[in-house]
Amino acid sequence: MVEVKSIPDRNLAIFIGGQSASALGDAVHRLALSLYMLDLTGSALQVGLVLVTTALPALLLGPFVGRLFDRARAPQGILFLSDLARAGAVLLIPLSGNASAIYALSLVANSLGFVTKVGVNTLTPAAFPEERLMFVNSVTRVGTRAMHVLGPTLSGLLYGSLGPLAPFAVDAATFLLAALSYLGIVLKEQPRAKERKPETRADQRSAIGAVFRNRVVGLIFLFMGAAAVTSGAFNVLLVVLVRTELGLSAAEYGYVLSVGAMGLLLGALGTLRMSRGGSGSALTRILAAAVVADGLAIAWLGLAQGFWAVAFLMFVVGASSSVATVVSTTGLQLRVPEGLRGRVFSLYEQVFTSLSVASMLLGGALADGLGVRPIYLVGGVFQAVITGTAALSARFGEKGQKRD
């Protein structure tokens, strides 16, 4: 049984509730946005392009958002305003009536969502005891993954029975609840006054320096970067693999996605068993094992035949990627100094998003000529080999690492 007496119960309950509401909104939003754009334009290309707006904020806003939270005296207020504005933006989408307005509103909503994501990761270490960050991240992930299972089904039912306004209204309501939750979070101590006017380039150099100075942080970037190189192509080409290569029905494709979501949920539950302590060597070894398992499962998907084989591998991919996400987030929160967390988390999102988008583009281009299966096989092996080689190196996880 995990000991939780040192965690402020009120903070934990509010935090889990707010993050679960926000995750439900994200899941409802993505499906409703795709359906609405398709109904409005009849173009699959337009659907793909509007979903690309989810990646742009990390690439464009990273340096500025990180600096904002590193200087903030009251990060809860920034998070409140961000999700409040996001609720308004998504509510306007079904009222806009044209593709150009949807692109603009989607970009605004996703930009605010990026602000929230960086802010939550920065706020967490200030709200909970350091030795329990793994537990907090794990139990929060359980709640959000459960919402990712529920969200698409709820969105589809609402859209099909009540039209596009209903799911977007629910979406806005969840972001409003999340916004209110941040006002109830009490920090362990008042954040100290931050430096006033360092330049953005200097901020980025500080974040990059924090990555290279600390071995654990550097390994997290390396392992998760290797996973990002594979993940973009994996997500884009999955429907092609399942429907075209394997000839599975639309219903079977839905079942495969549900099994993957169950893996995500179980992986988050599994990290609760690992939440005692959080040393650098332990975290990096768990992270390496999860990323290697994820890569091998993706490679095996390139050889798999039939529904049950694909469903099993999707479960493994979901579970291992969920563990990797919790552990990497916890490792950064533990190892990055308080005054640099915002910038490092922004840099992390920039790197991961850039590699994922590049993977989407490269994977799609290569798949047209080589087929989907070789992309999965080569990408999964690449991810596992890069991570496994680093994990087996002589200096990996060595004792006495300096904590910056």
Image (cartoon, helix red, strand yellow):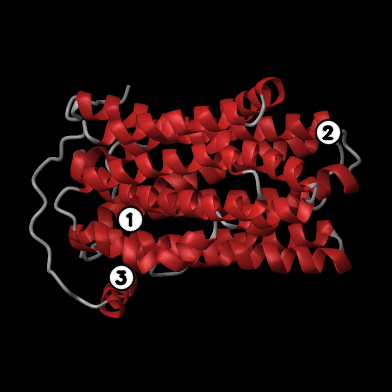
In-image side of 270 versus 379 (left or right): left
Q: Look at the image and tell me whether residue 272 can be seen.
A: no
Q: Residues within 10 Å of mark 2 (few under 14, many from 20)?
A: few
Q: Which amino acid type is shown beneath numbered disc 3?
A: Ala
Q: Residue at x 45, y 67 (%)?
A: 60
First in sequence: mark 1 vs mark 2: 2
Question: Marks 3 and 1: which is nearer the front?
Answer: 3
**Could you say whether the residue bearing mark 3 is in a helix, strand or loop?**
helix
Q: Which amino acid type is shown beneath numbered disc 2?
A: Ala
**Could you say whether the residue bearing mark 1 is in a helix, strand or loop?**
helix
**Could you say whether the residue bearing mark 2 is in a helix, strand or loop?**
helix
State which quarter of the image contains the C terminus.
bottom left
Q: Is residue 305 above or below residue 210?
A: above
Q: In this view of the protein, which residue sits in the foreground, 196 or 168?
A: 168
In-image side of 156 versus 12 (left or right): right
The residue wearing badge 2 is 250
**Mark number, residue 134:** none
Percent x, y for residue 304? 82, 45
Percent x, y for residue 203? 27, 73
Tally of numbered discs:
3
Percent x, y for residue 190? 8, 47
Q: Residue at x 29, y 24 (%)?
A: 13
Question: Marks 1 and 2: which is nearer the front?
Answer: 2
Q: Look at the image and tell me whether residue 51 can be seen.
A: yes
Q: Quadrant of residue 308?
A: top right
Percent x, y for residue 335? 27, 58
The residue wearing badge 1 is 332
State which quarter of the image contains the N terminus.
top left
Q: Marks 3 and 1, Cα distance to the nearest angstrom?
A: 12 Å
The residue wearing badge 3 is 207
Q: In this view of the protein, which residue sits in the foreground, 71 or 218?
A: 71
Q: Quadrant of residue 215?
A: bottom left
